[in-house]
Image: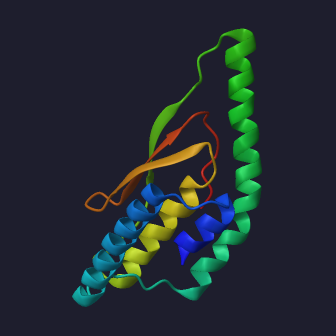
Amino acid sequence: MLMALWFAFVWKVEAGEAVFGIAGAAIAASADVGIRRRRRFAKFRPAPRWLLEFWREPGYVVSGTAIIFWVLLRRIILGREPDSLLRSIPFDSGGETARAAARRALALTLTTIPPNFIVIGIDEDKDLMLLHQVQESGVEE
């Protein structure tokens, strides 16, 4: 289906694209069937209220983008290096349940969407999240 949309988008059909597209689709479909048969591929059971946290992201993206552009302008105009830093923040990893896996995945996703933050990883033994920031700013709860 996606191949048909691609061909409609580019408005031409070339044999090479069709052959590689069919092969790629067959590989992807086979992998999908194999993964679905395992049934335990990914444990993910978020609480619906956690998904409501996405409403904050547009504001974080705007403020994070402003910070990134400020750092860029300081670098270009003043020649100052960014004050980037690695920091660890407390984060209860919650164990090995599907609910805990969902919480970690959503925390990682929601924290990494703003451009000033990149989650390096979550240390489940020490209950810490390691972040990289281009410019130091507050970390929202």
Q: Is residue 133 visible?
A: yes
User: Residue 129 sits in which quadrant?
Assistant: bottom left
* Rendered residue at 40%/83% (across/down): 99
Q: Tell how many labels.
A: 0
Q: Give 101 or 1, whichever is nearer the viewer.
A: 1
Q: Is residue 41 visible?
A: no
Residue 42: give x, y in percent of width and height. 33, 79
Q: Give 60 or 124, whichever is nearer the viewer.
A: 60
- Is 76 above or below relative to 117? above
Residue 44: give x, y in percent of width and height. 40, 81
* Rendered residue at 59%/65% (across/down): 6
* Rendered residue at 43%/76% (across/down): 102
* Rendered residue at 60%/65% (across/down): 7
- Is 140 above or below relative to 8? above
Q: How is the image coloured?
A: rainbow
Residue 26: give x, y in percent of width and height. 34, 74
- Is 132 above or below relative to 29? above
Q: Give 101 or 88, whichever is nearer the viewer.
A: 101
Residue 77: give x, y in percent of width and height. 75, 12
- Quarter of the image where the C terminus is located: bottom right
Q: Is residue 28 left or right of residue 39?
A: right
